[in-house]
Image (cartoon, rainbow, N blue to C red):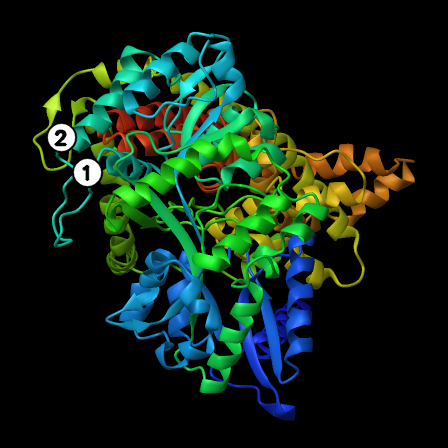
């Protein structure tokens, strides 16, 4: 009987995890009044990777607690400050902090689900409240009651490259004010050649909707009617937005050949000096400089073209419904100290920001009014260290927009305004509905060594005559009954396979030869789908990336698990522990694993570059670089999936008779010779099987490119399966998607045929 060390290890981990969860849980509503202090928990403390911001945050909390010794502030860091995937769950589960961060667009939702405290009775104690812009205060006001305090705000504009404007013969001090001027300037910039793009718009990963909304507002349109129930995009204003984009893309060719971009793609183009203009908020400018290689003097910001409206956003803090009056009062004092004191605090200490080489002077919309605003602007101007003249057009245009248009044209969106001295880039939630790839778990077919039975003497056989077999009829009936019972057990599985595996596969082959849109009758088009997909510029990139990914994954995914299995096989102590450690990544959901690595690879705040900086080594763009993105994803896939492979190799290694190694040692074989002449031949079948299964799995890679890179940058990580997803769910072209699927099916079928032939030959041998 085998040792139960594995079970003991798992049990110990479970107990430790439970204790850790119990110790870290902090239910809201506990005023923590021990020792006469009021305790409040707050979130949105900068992560440890943002060292400067975190130090500022902790310094300000320490100063606040010194000034208010009866208040104890416990800060929780988060990246991002609010994760939409867990936000509602934390509220419903009572795990939300006493004072918690929200986007502008979350205010009414939190109130509607009855998770926010009413702050109205306490506002008289927050003297700075009346100095905040009324339109920002109104965002957290629902039915006449105040449920939150705004912290920052921003609005969108047109970021443009002054150097490219000059090269194209344009005046960089006179940016385009209308969409016709944007189109004309983009055409001139694109004419510079050498891969220069005049205007870019990001649209993939749910980023196209709010960009279209911003452009629609700038034309004077709206996305919904006044009742909030009917879409109003099919209007002259909506048509104007789409017609302008169509003409720039297809008539002028000023938007480049690559579309379905994400924000990182556009930022990379702007930072490298290959892009003339794109729409965004001022918080993009420090990202372009710090992470993408841009220069402050080359980057400028203009108001939204069209001048009829723009999109605003921002954030603030709300209070947990379980907070006591003492906690609400303490939380308001903390907000006043941290964020609402002009020229001071975490966001307003411009002198401290300048001293630490953080950008001061970026054109954020003003939070305050009156004397408070004047003081804030005075301190900000005195400490400005960026070319503020590059943003004057944006400030002037926004002031005119606010003065000349109704307030409802300043639309909030779900996005966070980066504070002036924040490190790292903003984190946008990835789209939901991930497709999880199946991991293949196959055990080795271990063969047992059998001993040849000794033949009994003839005389012994005579003493023990052979018994007659049972009647043929009875044995036949039992055999049929056994077979019927077996097929009965298989019937459920066969039905499931038929409905959910075989039928969809056959249906996909049929649709590959049709023009198919859900809800409409299919139309036979022959091989037109295959021809169209074959000539798609992304087709070559997708297959090249997929095959390269497979090759790199084989090099890493074969060698690393095999070496780890050899090491584990030689261990004499803590074998069960290390097996659990190796297998742990397999138990993490693929999307969660990908999101963790996405943070790990972040060029600004990720742990990878932080480690390189600590070692005084050059940093890398990781998934943001066209040369490093694919190998970065290979590392993620290898780490996430190698646990099962290691255990299979380990089982195969443990089935090798020890006598073979002893014989090799007696013959004078060293370690490498024993591995070559004993280990590899004895595990040949398992190695071959896992190699072919790995080829099949890596040819279908999807989760890592989808979650981490979105196929970018510049299609450097788009794979065949990701291209199938784009055809089906972004282009609504199911015929093209199925045509690609059939191509992949044929290739994988060839690999499967090789696999079956080789395994059959091995079995015959």
Q: Residue furthest left?
A: 521
* Structural crowding at the residue carrying mark 1, measured as other residues with C-alpha within 10 Å and reported as few (<14), some (14–19) or many (≥20): many
* Residue drawn at x 41%, y 67% as measured from the top left: 130
Is the C-beta separation of discs 1 and 2 under 8 Å? yes
* Quadrant housing residue 57: bottom right
Q: Position of residue 488 (x, y in %)?
A: 25, 57
The quarter of the rendered structure image containing the N terminus is: bottom right
Q: Position of residue 80 (x, y in %)?
A: 51, 54
Nearer-the-camera pick, 643 or 716: 716
* Residue drawn at x 30%, y 56% as measured from the top left: 486
* Residue drawn at x 38%, y 15% as measured from the top left: 185
Nearer-the-camera pick, 141 or 741: 141
Q: Position of residue 693 (x, y in %)?
A: 50, 36
* Quadrant housing residue 558: top right
* Structural crowding at the residue carrying mark 2, measured as other residues with C-alpha within 10 Å and reported as few (<14), some (14–19) or many (≥20): few
Judging by the rendered image, the residue that carries numbered circle 2 is: 236
- Say which element carries label 2: helix
Nearer-the-camera pick, 47 or 439: 47
Height in image: 303 above or below 660?
above
Nearer-the-camera pick, 187 or 625: 187
225 vs 738, left or right, is: left
Q: Position of residue 127 (x, y in %)?
A: 47, 72
- Say which element carries label 1: loop
Judging by the rendered image, the residue that carries numbered circle 1 is: 221
Q: Which mark is residue 583?
A: none
532 vs 129, left or right, is: left
Q: Is residue 260 visible?
A: yes
> How much space separates mark 1 and mark 2, taking CA atoms?
8 Å
The quarter of the rendered structure image containing the C terminus is: top right
* Quadrant housing residue 665: top right
């Amino acid at each position: 009987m085998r040792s139960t060390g594995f079970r003991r290890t798992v049990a110990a981990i479970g107990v430790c995890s439970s204790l850790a969860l119990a110790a870290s849980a902090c239910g809201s509503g506990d005023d923590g009044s021990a020792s006469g202090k009021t305790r409040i928990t707050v979130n949105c403390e900068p992560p440890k990777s943002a060292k400067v911001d975190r130090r500022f945050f902790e310094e300000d909390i320490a100063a606040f607690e010194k000034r208010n010794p009866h208040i104890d502030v416990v800060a929780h860091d988060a990246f991002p400050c609010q994760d939409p995937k867990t936000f509602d769950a934390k509220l419903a589960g009572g795990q939300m902090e006493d004072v918690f961060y929200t986007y502008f667009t979350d205010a009414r939702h939190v109130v509607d689900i009855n998770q926010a405290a009413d702050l109205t009775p306490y506002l008289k104690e927050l003297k700075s409240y009346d100095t905040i812009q009324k339109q920002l205060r109104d965002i957290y006001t629902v039915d006449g009651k105040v449920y939150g305090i705004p912290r920052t705000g921003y609005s969108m504009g047109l970021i443009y490259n002054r150097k490219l404007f000059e090269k194209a013969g344009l005046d960089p001090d006179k940016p385009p004010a209308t969409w016709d001027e944007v189109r004309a300037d983009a055409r001139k910039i694109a004419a510079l050649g050498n891969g220069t793009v005049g205007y870019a718009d990001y649209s993939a990963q749910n980023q196209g909707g709010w960009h279209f909304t911003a452009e629609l507002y700038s034309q004077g349109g709206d996305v919904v009617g006044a009742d909030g129930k009917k879409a109003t995009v099919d209007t002259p204003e909506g048509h104007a937005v789409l017609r302008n984009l169509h003409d720039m893309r297809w008539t002028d060719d000023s938007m480049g050949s690559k579309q379905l971009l994400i924000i990182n793609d556009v930022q990379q183009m702007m930072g490298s000096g290959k892009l003339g203009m794109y729409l965004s908020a001022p918080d993009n400018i420090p990202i372009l400089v710090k992470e993408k290689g841009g220069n402050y003097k080359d980057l400028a910001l203009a108001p939204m073209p069209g001048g009829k409206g723009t999109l605003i956003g921002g954030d603030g803090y709300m209070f947990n419904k379980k907070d006591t009056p003492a906690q609400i009062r303490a939380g308001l004092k903390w907000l006043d100290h941290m964020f609402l004191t002009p020229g001071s605090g975490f966001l307003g200490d411009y002198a401290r920001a300048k001293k630490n080489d953080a950008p001061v002077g970026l054109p954020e919309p003003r939070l305050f009014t009156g004397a408070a605003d004047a003081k804030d602007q005075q301190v900000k101007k005195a400490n400005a260290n960026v070319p503020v003249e590059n943003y004057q057009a944006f400030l002037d245009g926004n002031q005119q927009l606010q003065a000349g248009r109704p307030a409802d044209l300043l639309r909030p969106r779900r996005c966070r305004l980066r504070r002036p001295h924040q490190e790292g880039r903003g984190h946008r939630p990835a789209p939901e509905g991930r497709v999880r790839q199946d991991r293949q778990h196959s055990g080795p077919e271990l063969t047992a060594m059998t001993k040849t039975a000794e033949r009994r003497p003839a005389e012994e056989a005579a003493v023990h005559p052979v018994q007659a077999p049972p009647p043929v009829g009875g044995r036949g009936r039992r055999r049929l009954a056994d077979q019927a019972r077996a097929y009965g057990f298989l019937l459920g599985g066969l039905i499931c396979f038929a409905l959910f595996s075989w039928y969809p596969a056959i249906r996909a082959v049929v649709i590959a030869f049709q023009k198919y849109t859900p809800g409409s009758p299919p139309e036979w088009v022959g091989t037109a789908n295959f021809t169209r997909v074959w000539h798609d510029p992304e087709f070559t990139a997708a297959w090249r990336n997929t095959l390269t990914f497979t090759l790199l994954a084989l090099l890493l995914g074969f060698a690393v698990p095999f070496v780890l299995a050899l090491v584990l096989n030689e261990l004499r102590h803590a074998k069960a522990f290390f097996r659990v450690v190796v297998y742990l990544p397999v138990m993490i959901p693929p999307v969660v694993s990908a999101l963790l690595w996405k943070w790990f690879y972040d060029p600004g705040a990720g742990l990878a570059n932080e480690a390189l900086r600590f070692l005084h080594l050059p940093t890398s763009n990781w998934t943001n670089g066209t040369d490093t993105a694919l190998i970065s994803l290979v590392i993620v896939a290898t780490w996430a999936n190698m646990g099962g492979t290691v255990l299979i190799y380990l089982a195969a290694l443990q089935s090798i008779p020890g006598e073979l190694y002893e014989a090799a040692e007696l013959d004078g074989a060293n370690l490498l010779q024993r591995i070559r002449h004993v280990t590899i031949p004895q595990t040949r079948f398992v190695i071959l099987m896992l190699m072919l299964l790995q080829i099949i799995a890596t040819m279908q890679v999807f989760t890592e490119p989808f979650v981490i890179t979105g196929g970018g940058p510049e299609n450097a990580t788009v794979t065949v399966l990701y291209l199938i997803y784009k055809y089906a769910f972004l282009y609504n072209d199911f015929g093209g998607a199925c045509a690609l699927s059939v191509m992949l099916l044929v290739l994988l079928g060839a690999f499967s045929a090789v696999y079956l032939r080789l395994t059959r030959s091995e079995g015959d041998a």
